[in-house]
Amino acid sequence: MTESLAKTNLLDLDPAALQEFLSGLGEKPYRTTQVLKWLYQFGVDNFDDMTNISKDLRQQLKDVAEIRAPNVETEQRSDDGTVKWLLRLQDGNCIETVFIPEDNRGTLCVSSQVGCALECSFCSTAQQGFNRNLDVSEIIGQVWIANRALDTTHREERKISNVVFMGMGEPLLNFNNVVSAIRLMTEDNAYGLSKRRVTISTSGVIPALDRLTDVADVALAVSLHAPNDALRDQLVPLNRKYPIAEMLAACHRYVQSQTHRSKITFEYVMLAGINDTDAHARELVKLLRHLPAKVNLIPFNPFPNTRYQCSDEQTRNRFREILMRAGLVTVTRRTRGDDIDAACGQLAGKFHDRTKRRLRLHSALGDSQ
Ligand code: SAH
């Protein structure tokens, strides 16, 4: 245990950091390519399997490094093919990861933090509180574990083609580790995913959004959920710090900076009697008129002790119709894996809340008030 703490976990290193680490051992750059392929494409978990690497170097690596992903605590399979893993981290905390197979793609929904500090009132993760940020190895480790599990037990079409940061946590509040993990997801010698197939979902942390513009050209989803500040303040308390107009301006800057200029997805959870009237729909149309936007309506997924209910199907369709008629591309997200509590906002993990509830948001934002 103590020995393992002293070793470098190779899954914590993005491609540049791995290169630096290996050159510190006197190795040439091509070693990085070889090791990346072993780790991520072949999913090996011990150095002896790296057969194109000399025995001497393998021994050296065993002395100073390790390959350590989280442990699979449980694996649950939904009737619809969705798979949910509860993963135990070295400090005993647990997080959740979900794989969602579809006809033409397989999406892995990863967590970025142990819990979440943002207190969105309709989200089950928020009820649990916040513990800490995930390390790079704990983020990329989710892909590593899912990839291995799916490879050995599933047919070809079930493999991971997309990754979405829509599990537990706010990815932009764990910026550096999330960006390093994205570098591994999109690196050709690792998972080789196209940047457009990696999506960051955020409640709208503006300074981090602006930084993201410089470092990672990935797809963006924004948790909007309300068409005005008064309502959004209640549903997504982060809005009190970063109100809608400023957040949309940051979205605009993001789109401008992108090479591919893809649309931003605005997520909108359908809450009965709260944000689902015709007037809300029309307000939403006005708000998004000037952005390359598409809307993802998410039927609210209930969890114990929630005060909300999902809008009924008729209301959801009507809402969608108003947006579509105004020319906004709108899809209603199909609820997946709800029989195993793997749907949006149902991920809970197992961990201790380390922040006092009322201080949580401020501490996460580095606020002193
Ligand atoms: N912190 C990130 C990731 C959150 S989870 C963010 O805010 O975007 C991904 C999506 O699921 C978000 O849009 C989130 O608002 C939504 N969500 C949370 N709880 C939900 C629930 N109970 N039902 C449906 N969607 C929910």
Image (cartoon, rainbow, N blue to C red):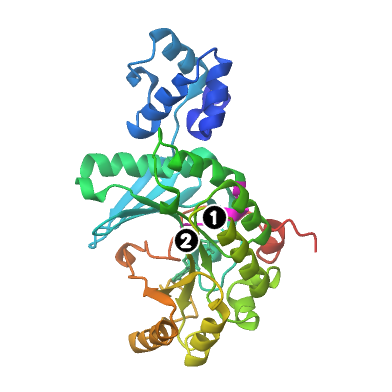
- Please say whether residue 7 is visible from this viewpoint: no
Is residue 306 visible in this depiction of the protein? yes
All told, the count of numbered labels is 2
| Image: 136 above or below 309 | above
Q: Nearer the viewer, residue 152 or 263?
A: 263
| Mark 2 vs mark 1, CA separation in Å | 8 Å
Percent position (x, y) of residue 117?
A: 61, 60
- Mark 2 is on which residue type? Ser
Q: Is residue 170 magenta?
A: yes
Q: Quadrant of the C terminus?
A: bottom right
Residue at (48% x, 89% y) in the render: 273
**Residue in the picture at 43% in, 25% down:** 33
Image-based side of 122 in relation to 56, left or right: right
x then y, percent, for residue 289: 54, 78
Identify the residue position indicated by label 2 in the image: 262
Q: Amino acid at mark 1?
A: Gln
Return the residue at label 1: 258
Q: Nearer the viewer, residue 356 or 137?
A: 137
Under circle 2, the secondary element is: loop
Proximity of marks 2 and 1: CB atoms separated by less than 8 Å:
yes
Q: Is residue 65 magenta?
A: no
Ligand 1 is within 8 Å of the C-beta of the residue at disc 2: no
Q: Residue at x 40, y 32 (%)?
A: 189
- The x and y percentages for residue 129 are 58, 60
Q: Which residues are magenta?
A: 166-175
Q: Quadrant of residue 40?
A: top left
Q: Is residue 349 above or below residue 136?
A: below
Q: In the orientation shown, which residue stands out farthest toward the right?
A: 369
Residue 252: percent from left, percent from top: 60, 65
Q: Secondary structure at mark 1?
A: loop
